[in-house]
Amino acid sequence: EVQLVQSGAEVKKPGESLKISCKGSGYSFTTYWIAWVRQMPGKGLDSMGIIYPGDSDTRYSPSFQGQVTFSADKSISTAYLQWSSLKASDTAMYYCVRRGAGSGYYFDYWGQGTLVTVSS
Amino acid sequence: SYDLTQPPSVSVSPGQTASITCSGDKLGDKYACWYQQKPGQSPVLVIYQDNKRPSGIPERFSGSRSGNTATLTISGTQAMDEADYYCQAWDSTTVVFGGGTKLTVL
């Protein structure tokens, strides 16, 4: 069974750094792209970008370029999303998602989400 | 930037057919997909490649695309289908989500 299990909720202060994780299992972690999707409170879905764990090829959506960093450790089938200096506006649920293997661009499995709260 | 436009809300009576549209200038040559999100849960893929259903998704969910508009259709809508629905496409560089449609079954 394919699973993406994310790290737990975080409460941080503005200016602090943070790294959240997403562990894949039940499939070949290195051969599927992993994307990150943000959902701000009461709002819709925003694509942040994507990483290929096999070689760490990374693409950031324009709105998130320079704001976050993706990484992956294929030895432990885990992808990461990190911030160097959080802002209150980073408060959101963050989902890691697997890109499907077929034609087109779709996300076939979603993690349970990591809630990040940034408040002074 | 590339936008996908959905109606904010759609209402349907139980047992009737619900249709949710998604329109975008570049949708004509790109596959669309659809996600269902219930309160407090992660989104779930219900349609991909315009009209394919992942395993486990009921047959009452179907998708189509004509020109620059993709449509999610739920036949024989059930109370459990009440949720937010998001369309999504890709413009060769950026993944784009529609703003979401709240489906109310009343």
Image (cartoon, rainbow, N blue to C red):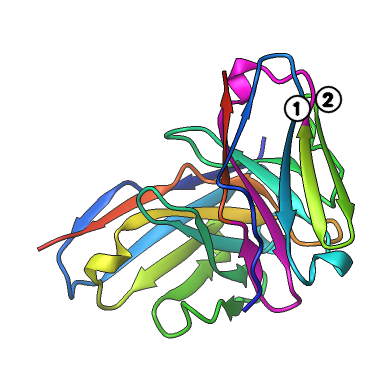
Cβ–Cβ under 8 Å for marks 2 and 1 = no
Does the magenta-highlighted stretch encompass residue B81?
Answer: yes
Q: Residue furthest bottom?
A: A66
Q: Residue at x 48, y 83 (%)?
A: A65
Answer with the quarter of the image where residue B61 lies: top right
Q: Is residue B36 above or below residue A116?
A: above
Residue type, label 2: Glu
Subunit ID for the residue under disc 2: B
Camera sees residue B52: yes
Asked if badge 2 and badge 1 are on a common chain, one would say yes
Q: Position of residue B1 (x, y in %)?
A: 62, 79
Q: Nearer the viewer, mark 2 or mark 1?
A: 2
Q: In this figure, which residue is indicated by the disc labeled 1?
A: B56
Q: In this figure, which residue is indicated by the disc labeled 2?
A: B59
Q: Residue furthest left?
A: A120
Q: Is residue A86 above or below residue A6?
A: below
Subunit ID for the residue under disc 1: B
Which image quadrant: the C terminus of chain B? Answer: top right
Dot 1 lies on which element? Answer: loop
Residue type, label 1: Gly
Q: Residues within 10 Å of mark 1 (few under 14, many from 20)?
A: few
Q: Residue furthest top?
A: B15
Does the magenta-highlighted stretch encompass residue A73?
Answer: no
Looking at the image, how many numbered discs can be counted on the residues?
2
Q: Position of residue B59 (x, y in %)?
A: 83, 25
Q: Residue at x 73, y 59 (%)?
A: B23
Answer with the quarter of the image where residue A21 lies: bottom left
Front position in the image: A101 or B73: B73
Q: Is residue A112 above or below residue A45?
A: above
Magenta stretch bounds: B74-98
